[in-house]
Image (cartoon, rainbow, N blue to C red):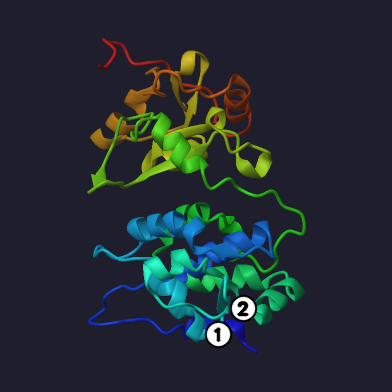
Amino acid sequence: MDWLERIAKLRQWARSGTRAPHKPLLLLYALGRFQEDSDAGLRYSAVEQDLQRLLVEYGPPNRTTPAYPFHHLVSDGVWEVRTDRGPGSPGSGIRDLRETGATGRLAPELRAALRREPDLLGRIARLLLDRHFPPSLHGELCEAVGLEPQWAGTERLPAVRRQRDRRMRELVLTAYEYRCAFCGYDGRIGAMPVGLEAAHVRWWAFDGPDDLENGLCLCSLHHKLFDKGVLGVGDGHRILVSQRFVGHSPAAREHVTALAGRPLAGPQPGARPVAAAHRDWHTSQVFQGSPRPAPAGPEPL
């Protein structure tokens, strides 16, 4: 059976280009959970909030519910649902899914194929991402569902792997009050933050833990610059800017070079700041060259 072809042909509601990523989001979430425990089922009442957050953040602007894909994905042959009464979905009603103990998981044949073919999970994830979401969202979406971004773009998955903690993003953004620790950006659409990410100080691939002491809330621009070594965090939790960075525009000066020596914005009182060991790792392994001196003049408020 060609699983990629079957998943590429998921039946979705469509009209005039309206996005309907409900089933792809559920499948990505299920793949992330499969990596954690290939035998565990997803009880609707236990995962409803996770799925709802995914729909709010990555789904269409109109109000929707995860009950729809939880029930209807069965018809595509890649998903099964059982209740406390036995096999079969009780329907797409939220109350029915909750009260019957509806539990979903990838179809048995698909689970068997994923175990036989170590690279199949990554190819399915890449297909779902490429077909339903812009590249700018791939990394953070993988993080949100517990998938490693590079696994969705490689031919073979590593045999031994740690599992990401999907709670880290919310933990870090909350600690920094949903604003970039470098520039204070705090954009939202409605109640949802836009362009804010949880950055690992010590990279996850190099044993960086998924905890607050290894995290920073950064806007998309400063997250990229931080991971490229343009920016860092020094003693006293002040921002480092690499002397190797060159930018002549007012925007480059305002958003990068002017940050040198500024204190981080956050975390809020009672939350643990970035640990010195993780700061030191980033400075020695990622940060480019020497830090430039802080600009003269009063410190920004």
Circle 2 packing at 10 Å, graded few (<14), some (14-19), many (20+), is some
> If you read the primary sequence from the N terminus, does the residue marked by circle 1 or circle 2 appear first?
1
Whether residue 132 is visible, yes or no, is no
* Real-space CA distance between mark 1 and mark 2, rounded to the nearest whole angstrom: 7 Å
The amino acid sitting under disc 1 is Gly
Mark 1 crowdedness (10 Å alpha carbons): few <14, some 14-19, many ≥20: some
Q: Is residue 61 above or below residue 284?
A: below
Quadrant of the frame with the N terminus: bottom right
> Secondary structure beneath disc 1?
loop
Location of residue 184 (image quadrant): top left
Residue at the image point whose x is 22% and y is 81% from the top: 16
Q: Is residue 298 visible?
A: yes
Q: Residue at x 57, y 70 (%)?
A: 84
Disc 1 and disc 2 in contact, CB within 8 angstroms: yes
State the residue position of label 2.
Answer: 107
Amino acid residing under circle 2: Ala
From the viewer's side, name the closer residue of 39 and 147.
39
Q: Is residue 219 left or right of residue 167?
A: left
- Count all numbered tags in the image, as a single digit: 2
Judging by the rendered image, the residue that carries numbered circle 1 is 77
